[in-house]
Image: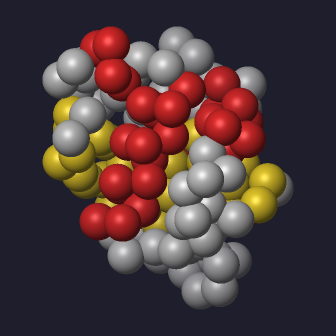
Amino acid sequence: MEKQTIIETSHGRIAVNDVPGGGTPLLMVHANSGCKEMFLFQTQALAGTRRLLSVDLPGHGASSDAIDPRRTYCFGGYAEAIAEVLAKLDIERPAILGHSLGAILHWTSFHVSRMSRAS
């Protein structure tokens, strides 16, 4: 069953959909001006195959606006916010499914050890 939660980060409150499952978790990150619900069909199709996470980036969807916009509203700031969410959920090295901005964040975040590969 899908669990919707809010994770407190130094960038603001991040909304997360979390669907339980085994194996390597899959983190889904939306495009600019999008939201986690854009992955509804993927979540339905993949439910039960692995743990599925979709997030609203700061200033998007159900997440709060950034605490410090200059720090957060850039590729590095978004990547840091996601890394904080993963740390608080105790998730290391998930597979990443990114759409547009979400894909760019993966490539920007190679320095963040909690992210492993593109899917």
Image position of 11 with respect to 6: above or below: above
Q: Residue reaching furthest right?
A: 119
User: Residue at the location (29% across, 14% down)?
Assistant: 69
- The furthest residue to the bottom: 22
Give the quadrant of residue 29: top right
**Res 96 quadrant in image:** bottom right
Q: Residue furthest front?
A: 111
Residue 66 percent across, percent down from the top left: 25, 22
Residue 35, compared with residue 48, is above or below; it is above
Q: Quadrant of the C terminus?
A: bottom right
Quarter of image, res 9: top left
- For this view, does 47 lie left or right of residue 76? right
At 42% across and 43% down in the image, what residue appears?
A: 80
Q: Nearer the viewer, residue 41 or 105?
A: 105
Q: Position of residue 78 (x, y in %)?
A: 46, 33
Residue 37 appears in view: no
- The answer, for residue 20, to whether it is visible in the render is yes
Q: 117 or 23: which is nearer to us?
A: 117
Query: Where 80 sits versus 75, above or below?
Result: below
Q: Is the image coloured rainbow, by chain, by secondary structure, or in one colour? A: secondary structure
Q: How many marks?
A: 0
Please report the residue visible at 21 percent of the width from the left and 34 percent of the height from the top.
Answer: 12
Which x, y percent locates residue 84? 34, 54
Q: In the picture shown, does residue 1 fall above or below 8?
A: below
The reply, left or right, for residue 115 in relation to residue 13 is: right
Q: For the N terminus, which image quadrant?
A: bottom left
**Nearer-the-camera pick, 101 or 71:** 71
